[in-house]
Amino acid sequence: TYDGAPKAITATTVPAGLTTTITYDGSTTHPTDAGDYAVTGTVNDANYEGASSGTLTISKAEQTLTPATLVSKQYGDAPFTVSATATSGLPVTITVASGPATISDGTVTLTGAGNVTLSYEQGGNGNWKPASTTRTFAVAKGNQSITFPTIPAKTFGDVDFTLGATAGSGLAVSYTVTSGPATIAGNTVHLTGAGTVNITAAQPGDDNWNGAASTSHTF
């Protein structure tokens, strides 16, 4: 089996102790790489002659892949790098086998919450057999918050106005009139009288985002 060291054949003679020359595919250099080599042993002696031939087979070696440790992530985390080493010293190719992520040049970008499985592969070469393995890590839902601009004082009879709250997730924010003389449709407020109005902004989340803490303004 290939291990990076030269492989040599030894020969015995009858009578014992005769000098021999051994060649590998016609060369006296001991082979190192995996493959099949035609071996010929020839007796070099003034009083004896003889030769024998056979085949030396150096098998490809097994290799092991060791991925760097993966930790749990949260959707919204920054892209991060992944890596792995092979006992062969050859480069390892990493791809996303399944789950909400993409990878480019060893950098993983999360595209949602869920479980992500990475595939690690090393295709081998003339001396090493191919190897592969997988690793899985969890991506938790991301946290979000709502930015709700202050609502200025109004006067009964003012035209309808719109609210501009935003969620860090980019998801739509919903509004409710918690108390007071007003109605709301979508993000448009209509005043129905004079008094104090309290409006609450909320974002319940989705498959990738946890719900945001609601926030309220009074005017």
Image: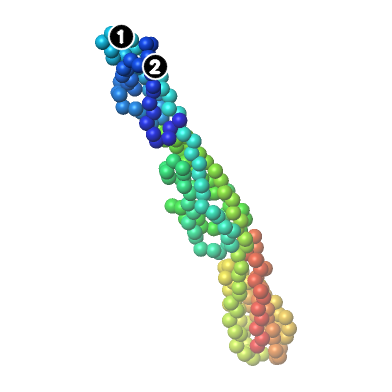
- The answer to which of 94 and 130 lies nearer the viewer is 130
Residue 5: percent from left, percent from top? 39, 34
Which of the image's four quarters has the C terminus?
A: bottom right
Residue 29: percent from left, percent from top? 31, 27
Residue 183 visible in this rendered orientation of the protein: no
Q: State the residue lying farthest toward the left.
A: 46
Decide which of tag 1 and tag 2 comes sooner along the chain. Answer: 2
Q: Height in image: 170 above or below 122?
A: below
Q: Specify few, some or many for label 1: CA neighbours under 10 Å numbering under 14, 14-19, or 20 or more.
A: few
Residue 180: percent from left, percent from top? 72, 85
Q: Which mark is residue 60?
A: none
Residue 212: percent from left, percent from top? 65, 71
Q: Residue at x 57, y 57 (%)?
A: 71
Amino acid at dot 1? Tyr
Q: Residue at x 30, y 9 (%)?
A: 48
Q: State the residue lying farthest toward the right.
A: 179
Q: Which of the 4 image quadrants contains residue 174?
A: bottom right
Q: Which mark is residue 12?
A: 2
For the residues marked 1 and 2, what is the alpha-carbon distance in whole angstroms? 14 Å
Amino acid at dot 2? Thr
Q: Height in image: 169 above or below 106?
A: below
Label 1's element? loop
Q: Residue at x 54, y 54 (%)?
A: 69
Label 2's element? loop
Q: Which mark is residue 48?
A: 1
- The answer to which of 136 and 6 lies nearer the viewer is 6
